[in-house]
Image (cartoon, grey):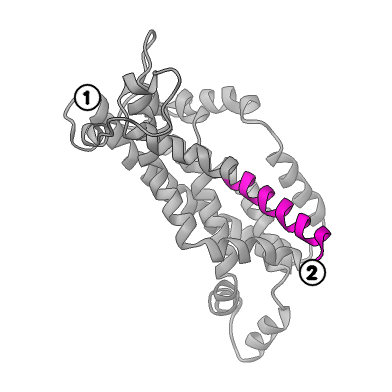
Amino acid sequence: MSRRKLFRHIFLGLAVLMVLVWSLFPLYWLFVSTISSDQELRHRPPHVFPNHPTLENYATILFGDNSTVRGFRFSLGNSLVVSLIATAIILILASSAAYVLTRYRFRGRGVLFGGLIYLNMLPLVAVIIPFYIIADALGLIDTKLALIVFYSGMNLTLAIWLLRNYFLTLPPELEEAAVLDGCSPIQVVFKVVLPLARPGLSAVGILTFLAIWNEFFLALIMTFSEKSQTFPVMLLTFSGRYAYNFAMTNTGALLGLVPPLGIMIIFNHWIISGLTAGYER
């Protein structure tokens, strides 16, 4: 091996190592902070690993009986319910709209699709006041239903765009052959299109679930009680006006990371194949 190639391999190895450290160190520090006391986390200089590791933070959150940790555990259930229902609604509506935009030609199709893309560019802060007024008029403030409805609308346009790109990769000849075999349009969708689109639907569903699970701003504005507050909002309860419990907050954040991280690991292949298939044309 020449000296130039050796230096190139060393440089690439160091670059990869730096990227790994940069990417994984926040997760490592998050874990370390969960097995440290709050006093040890405030020590200067900070310890790379705690001198006295403890699982007390986990025991407090998982089995504690005070109102704060009970509310946090309840918020995980709220987040799960809201994320799953909103994701299901989005997949049903987005797959229908994307299929129509892909397979049917009608006047204004391009304008309609362009309008959907532009809607996705609207920042949440620009529409939060209308959202609140509508929810207040319908009596939906501090309810999980309001979060489900608004999350479905907020994430629908991106889901339509991703699924449309995926449907474009599916050969229409398969649908034509199904029609010749006597399938109705509904049967074509359920027996041909949806099975072929499973990777794309899985990818969009997982990304939508992650986006809803981590959303904070809308849930902070729309909810104020334990019955409807989600996990990101309830993390605030571990801090007060004049104090901040880093250990408990980071422990709650790590526990809230488990469901989306597990989904990402299990369905990683489908996420990649579903997102890249739309760009193979």
- Secondary element at tag 2: loop
Residue tagged 2: 281
Of residues 128 and 28, the one nearer the viewer is: 28
Residue 157 in view (yes/no)? yes
Of residues 114 and 73, the one nearer the viewer is: 73
- Secondary element at tag 1: helix
Per the rendered image, the range of residues in magenta is 1-20
Of residues 238 and 275, the one nearer the viewer is: 238
Say which residue appears at 68% left-offset and 63% top-offset.
Answer: 276
62 left or right of 152 in image: left
Residue 144 in view (yes/no)? no
Query: Which numbered disc, 1 or 2, marks the residue that appears first in the sequence?
Result: 1
Query: Mark on residue 67?
Result: 1
117 left or right of 145 in image: right
Which kind of residue does numbered mark 2 sit on?
Arg
* Image position, residue 230 (x, y; %): 39, 34
